[in-house]
Image (cartoon, rainbow, N blue to C red):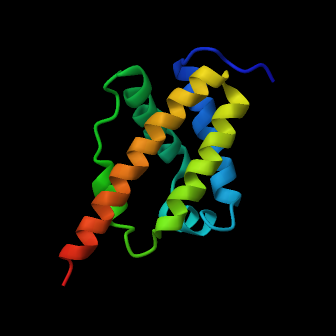
Amino acid sequence: MTRQDHITEAALSGLVHRFYAKVREDAVLGPVFNNAVDHWDEHFETLSKFWSSVMLTSGQYKGNPMAVHTKLAAVIKTPMFDRWLALWKETTEEMFTPEVAAQFQDRAGRIAKSLKMGLEFDAKRQP
């Protein structure tokens, strides 16, 4: 497979599908995602829009990732973020040149940090 040197909508869709195929099979992440997602085709579309908005500033995604993840706070554990990022790194490096993969990894790292902080803050507010 030739690694891509630029980001397109088609590449984003391919990345989302390939990455989440790994996530769904993962011993740590699979149970969480497979229990949380009922309609994978819709989820893939949402995630493709999310990454399009993040990487191409397309504005396609209109959701609230923090609200979605807060609903799963009871099952999301801190080490899961590291596993998610490791699979993301692996997949982006398979599909993209090192420079482009690094862009994806940087953004994902910032997003993961933000989500972790938000979930920790929310957990402290709970009675």
> Which image quarter is the C terminus in?
bottom left
**Residue 40 versus residue 97 in the image, above or below:** below
**Number of callouts:** 0
Compare residues 59 and 113 and report the one nearer the observer.
113
Q: Residue 32: x and y, percent?
A: 54, 67
- At x 40%, y 36%, the residue is 50
Is any atom of residue 18 visible in this view?
A: no
Query: Residue 83, located in which quarter of the rendered image?
Result: bottom right
Q: Residue 71: x and y, percent?
A: 33, 66
Q: Residue 64: x and y, percent?
A: 28, 47
**In the displayed structure, does residue 84 sit left or right of residue 106?**
right
Q: Residue 30: x and y, percent?
A: 62, 63
Compare residues 44 and 12 and report the one nearer the observer.
12
- At x 65%, y 24%, the residue is 98
Which residue reaches farthest bottom? 127
- At x 18%, y 74%, the residue is 125
**Residue 51 versus residue 41 in the image, above or below:** above
Which residue reaches farthest top? 5
Is any atom of residue 112 visible in this view?
A: yes
- At x 35%, y 22%, the residue is 57
**In the displayed structure, does residue 88 sit left or right of residue 94?**
left
> Which image quarter is the N terminus in?
top right
Query: Residue 7, located in which quarter of the rendered image?
Result: top right
**Residue 3 versus residue 127 in the image, above or below:** above
**Residue 36 versus residue 123 in the image, above or below:** above
